[in-house]
Image (cartoon, helix red, strand yellow):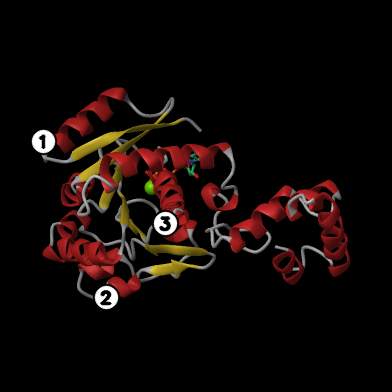
Amino acid sequence: MGDILVSTGRLSTQDALRILHQQKVSKKPFGEIAIALKVLTRADVDYALSLQFDYAYLSDKESDLSPALIAAYQPFSRVGENLRALRSQLMLRWFNADPHNKLLALVSPGTGEGRSFIAANLAIVFAQQGERTLLIDADMRSDPANGQGALFKLRGGVGLSGILAGRTTIEAAQAVPGLARLVVLPAGAQPPNPQELLGRVSFAQLLFEASQNFDVILIDTPSGTKYSDAEIIAARAGAAMMVTRKDKSQLSDAALLSQRLQDQGVLLLGAVLNDA
Ligand SMILES: Nc1ncnc2c1ncn2[C@@H]1O[C@H](COP(=O)(O)OP(=O)(O)OP(=O)(O)O)[C@@H](O)[C@H]1O
Ligand SMILES: [Mg+2]
């Protein structure tokens, strides 16, 4: 751990030697001694541990991805804990239930309810668990400034819409620096006909190809009440999880969307109340 902290400039060689000296005497962990000596913060220690154990974790000193990626910046926060609990439930109820279960759509009735936030952070916690994770932004309706491309600071231009239009391939998906095992496919240029594109066989082919190469594939969608895209996507995925936001989502809209999904044969795994 000392090596990582010294080489990233967080710890001086002199302080590292002081810690090692104390460690010989007290036999306590390196990080704990460093914090007690006030030469490192808890965040520095978490960062070094994450690198040591190959854990997807971002340090705000070194990454300029969106601060909304809480699971990456503060994996040990309450939000991180809640996301890991959600991950466990999803593993139990869906991904581990059958080796073919790899796709999951994140849906919600309205706008600004946190679908993209939950999809992004959930993708990070799956990657942290060692799952080869693909996050597909299938919301070709919302402002790209709120989409996965913006959250993960991806190169603009090509994305899902380009694949569906036959202009590019799954190669348009991008790895995220610092977050091993996570690959994100941005929505791409906003097309005039998202619903028609999602109905194409190329969407089914993309999901099939992704299933061969990834363990977990999460799909972000647009508002389920405003458009039928979410239904088409969830029907292809086979399963969906509903996001609702406290003081924002209408219960009647959520109930209606849930019914529409079930009519399409989608397995609705549950609903998360996003209470931020
Ligand atoms: N639990 C949360 N904690 C902190 N911020 C949150 C939380 N949930 C959502 N947000 C913030 O609320 C805003 C709206 O969330 P988000 O973009 O994920 O919603 P959405 O349902 O995908 O919206 P859209 O309909 O525009 O696609 C974002 O700025 C997001 O970072
Ligand atoms: Mg969104």
Total number of numbered labels?
3
Label 3 secondary element: helix
Q: Quadrant of ligand 1?
A: top left
| 40 relative to 77 in the view: left or right | right
Query: What is the three-letter code of the residue carrying label 2?
Result: Thr
Report if the CB atoms under discs 2 and 1 are less than 8 Å apart: no
When the figure is inspected, residue 264 is found, relative to residue 162, above or below; the finding is above
Q: Are marks 3 and 1 in contact (CB under 8 Å)?
A: no
Mark positioned earlier in the residue sequence (2 or 3): 3
**Which label number is shown at residue 7?**
none
Q: Position of residue 270 (x, y in %)?
A: 29, 33
**For residue 186, what is the image quadrant?**
bottom left
Q: Residue at 69% of width from left, 67% of height from top?
A: 4
> Which sits earlier in the primary sequence, circle 2 or circle 1?
2
Rounded to the nearest angstrom, the CA distance separating label 2 from label 1 is 33 Å
Left or right: 273, with 60 as reference point: left
SS for tag 1?
helix
Residue at position x 75%, y 55% from top? 30
Reading the image, the residue beneath label 1 is 263
Q: In the displayed structure, would residue 38 be above or below residue 89?
A: below
Q: Nearer the viewer, residue 105 or 12?
A: 12
Q: Which residue is mark 3?
A: 148
Instruction: Report if residue 163 is visible in the image.
Output: yes
The residue positioned 55% from the left and 55% from the top of the image is 66
Residue flagged by tag 3: what amino acid is it?
Gln
Where residue 119 appears, x then y in whole percent? 39, 48
Q: Which residue is mark 2?
A: 168
